[in-house]
Amino acid sequence: MRIGRLAELTGTAVETVRYYEKEGLLPEPSRSESNYRQYHARHLEQLFFIRNCRALDMTLNEIRELLALREQPQANCGDVTDLIDEHIDHVSSRLQSLTQLREQLIELRHRCRSASDGGHCGIIQQLEVSGAVQPSEQDSHVARSHGH
C-alpha cells in the first residue's frame, strides 16, 4: 500500500508517517518500480503501536524503548512495566504541575473581580508585573520530545 492509504487506515497525517520513518520508529518501506514507497502489514501494525503509545502521551524515546523491547524475544514483561512505571511517575509530576498552574490561573481570574483600576483589567495588570506568575518547577517530559 502507498503512504496515503497507510495514513488513512491509521488516522495519521502523511507528514507524521514520514517523520516517524525519519526518526527510525517505522522501518524503511520498500520501493515500487516507479519508486513509490510500499508499506506492508508490518508498517500498519507498528504505526498502530506508535499511535497507541502517543495516545498515552509517551515520548518518542519511550516508544523507541518499547519497540526495542518488542523486538527482543528475551525481554520480559518486567522491562516493559519498568518503563510504564517511569511514565506513570512523569504523568504524576505533570498532574502536580498542572494543579499548580490551575491554582495560579484561578488566582489570576480573581484579579478581574478585585483589582479593576480605572477601567484596567486586573488580569492584564497582574501579567505586567515581574514575577507575578511562577513557571512550573518541572518541565513536561513530553515537551522535551517532538509532539508528533
Image: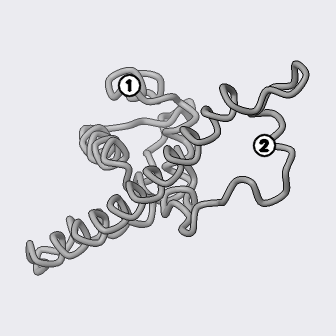
Q: Which is closer to the viewer, label 1 or label 2?
A: 2
Q: Look at label 1 and name its amino acid.
A: Gly
Residue visible at 64% across and 39% down in the picture: 108
Quadrant of residue 38 in the image? top left
Question: What residue sits right under mark 1 in the picture?
Answer: 11
Residue visible at 70% across and 53% down in the picture: 133
Q: Earlier in the sequence, mark 1 or mark 2?
A: 1
Q: Which mark is residue 115?
A: none
Q: Classify mark 1: residues with Cα within 10 Å, few (<14), some (14-19) or many (20+).
A: few
Q: Classify mark 2: residues with Cα within 10 Å, few (<14), some (14-19) or many (20+).
A: some
List x then y, in percent, for residue 56: 30, 47
Q: Secondary structure at mark 1?
A: loop
Quadrant of residue 73 in the image? bottom left
List x then y, in percent, for residue 148: 52, 44
Image quadrant occupied by the N terminus: top left
Q: Give the answer, above or below, for where 96 lies relative to 98.
A: below
Residue visible at 38% across and 29% down in the picture: 6
Distance, label 1 to label 2, CA atoms, is 42 Å
Residue visible at 42% across and 58% down in the picture: 94
Q: Give the answer, above or below, for where 28 lies relative to 113.
A: below
Q: Secondary structure at mark 2?
A: helix
List x then y, in percent, for residue 14: 53, 30
Asked whether 31 or 51 is in front, the reply is 51
List x then y, in percent, for residue 99: 43, 51
Q: Look at label 2 and name its amino acid.
A: Gln
Asked whether 117 or 2 is in front, the reply is 117
Display colour scheme: one colour
Asked whether 42 or 135 is in front, the reply is 135
Q: How many numbered discs, if any?
A: 2
Question: What residue sits right under mark 2 in the picture?
Answer: 126
Q: Give the answer, above or below, for where 76 lies relative to 10.
A: below
